Amino acid sequence: MSAPLILTLSCDDKPGIVARVTGNLFENGANILEAQQFDDAASGRFFMRVVMDPGEKDVVSLRETFAS
């Protein structure tokens, strides 16, 4: 197991964010160890924190997969 990485994100809330994030991690060989997410109805923002084992990916490569 590699050293765990923590992904944090915030964005406008809309359907499918959790699916896209977790799908991307799966497709890139990461293993989710812990995840929390919530939305703030007052601001319309979504927040997520994921602790993961990145597998063979380094942090720069993994970050690039989220660029788009």
Image: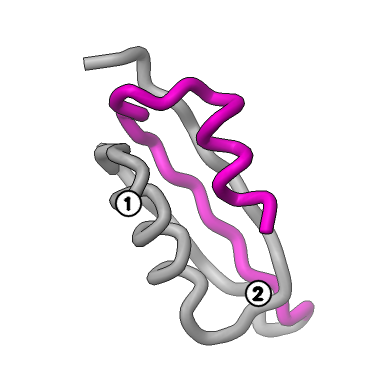
The one nearer the camera, 3 or 63, is: 63
The one nearer the camera, 23 or 48, is: 23
Q: Is residue 61 above or below residue 45?
A: above
Q: Quick check: 42 left or right of 28? A: right
Task: Indicate which disc, 1 or 2, sits on the residue closer to the N terminus.
Answer: 1
Q: Where residue 23 appears, x then y in whole percent?
A: 35, 61
Q: Quick check: 12 left or right of 29? A: right
Q: Where residue 58 appears, x then y in whole percent?
A: 48, 21
The residue indicated by pointer 2 is 40
Which amino acid type is shown beneath numbered disc 1?
Answer: Glu
The quarter of the rendered structure image containing the N terminus is: top left
- How packed mark 2 is, by other alpha carbons closer than 10 Å (few <14, some 14-19, many 20 or more), is few
Direction left: furthest residue: 1
Q: Which of marks 1 and 2 is in front?
A: 1
Which amino acid type is shown beneath numbered disc 2?
Answer: Asp
In this picture, which residue range is highlighted in magenta? 43-68
The one nearer the camera, 25 or 32, is: 25
Q: How many marks?
A: 2
Q: In this view, does 66 lie above or below 29?
A: below
Q: In which quarter of the image is residue 22?
A: bottom left
Q: Is residue 63 above or below residue 57?
A: below
Q: Where residue 45 appears, x then y in whole percent?
A: 70, 72
The residue indicated by pointer 1 is 27
Q: Quick check: 36 left or right of 60? A: left
Give the residue at x 36% y 29%: 54
Q: Does the magenta stretch include residue 46?
A: yes
Give the residue at x 28% y 42%: 32
